[in-house]
Image (spheres, rainbow, N blue to C red):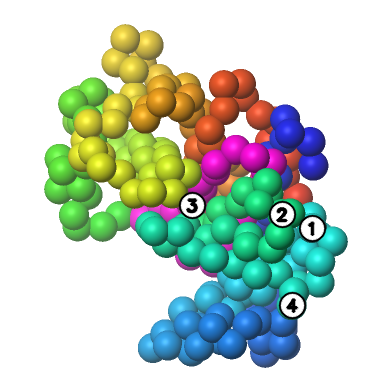
């Protein structure tokens, strides 16, 4: 993987349910314990698949066997590789519905978020509490529920990806982070925050999903997909 690239891996859990029972073999005791704490089978399966492919995918980039990868958790819960000499490999992942997305690159802090687009009762409340003035104005100008949901998730995944890329939590109110340009009637892709340059891009996903990545860089990186489920 070149410094100028971001690699995206998309996993469809629904196609793996017959194999999940075989995934526990490479998980750590801590990962098995965390997976087992979920009340519902669907959530336990998703956790197992998430941990399994975290190890499987990263082993392909590091040359280590999946079992020998070591992880540490940052203050805000962001995972990092803890093996000596591999800290340059930055990654993040997110899941929603039946999909898990993993984003990897060299050196730049990165965050990713994916969401299944669906209606929920607190939509307007979330917009009011977490969207900037420009974002709220653009949202309220839309007339159909479909357009409102589409806009909401495009902003929401961008903000989630940004917070995850920071890896330290966000001191400012999310409403103070504006990711929509009223002047150009478009989403903001490059901005400066906390002494660093950040880039946010939307990922290509199946139609029912919206996903975004954010990474610390002056210039845009090439996104390369590694899954036949991308449509």
**Circles 1 and 2: CB atoms closer than 8 Å:** yes
The x and y percentages for residue 229 are 69, 55
Q: Earlier in the sequence, mark 1 or mark 4?
A: 1
Q: Which residue is mark 2?
A: 86
Q: Residues within 10 Å of mark 2 (few under 14, many from 20)?
A: some
103 drawn magenta: yes
Which is more toward the observer, 204 or 27? Answer: 27
Residue occupying image coordinates x 43% and y 43%: 166
> Is-magenta flag for residue 1?
no
Side of 173 where 51 appears, left or right: right
**Residue 114: assigned label:** 3
Check residue 62 in the rendering and tell me which mark sits there, or answer none. Answer: 1
Residue span colored magenta: 97-118
Which quarter of the figure has residue 155? top left
For the residues carrying marks 3 and 2, which lies nearer the camera in this image?
A: 2
Q: Which residue is mark 4?
A: 67
């Amino acid at each position: 993987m070149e410094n100028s690239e971001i690699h995206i891996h998309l996993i469809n859990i629904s196609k793996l349910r017959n194999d999940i029972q075989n995934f526990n073999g490479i998980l750590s005791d801590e990962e098995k314990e965390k997976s087992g704490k979920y009340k519902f089978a669907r959530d336990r399966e998703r956790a197992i698949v998430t941990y399994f492919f975290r190890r499987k995918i990263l082993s392909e980039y590091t040359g280590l066997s999946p079992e020998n990868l070591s992880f540490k958790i940052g203050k805000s819960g962001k995972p990092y590789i803890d093996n000596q000499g591999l800290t340059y490999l930055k990654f993040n992942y997110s899941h929603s519905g039946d999909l898990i997305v993993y984003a990897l690159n060299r050196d730049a802090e990165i965050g990713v978020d994916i969401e299944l687009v669906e209606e929920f009762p607190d939509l307007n409340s979330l917009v009011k509490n977490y969207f900037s003035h420009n974002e709220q104005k653009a949202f309220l100008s839309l007339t159909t529920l479909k357009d409102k949901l589409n806009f909401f998730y495009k902003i929401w995944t961008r903000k989630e990806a940004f917070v995850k890329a920071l890896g330290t939590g966000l001191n400012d109110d999310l409403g103070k982070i504006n990711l929509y340009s009223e002047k150009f009637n478009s989403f903001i892709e490059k901005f400066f925050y906390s002494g660093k340059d950040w880039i946010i891009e939307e990922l290509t996903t199946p139609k029912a999903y919206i996903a975004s990545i954010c990474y610390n860089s002056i210039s845009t990186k090439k996104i390369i997909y590694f899954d036949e489920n991308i449509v």
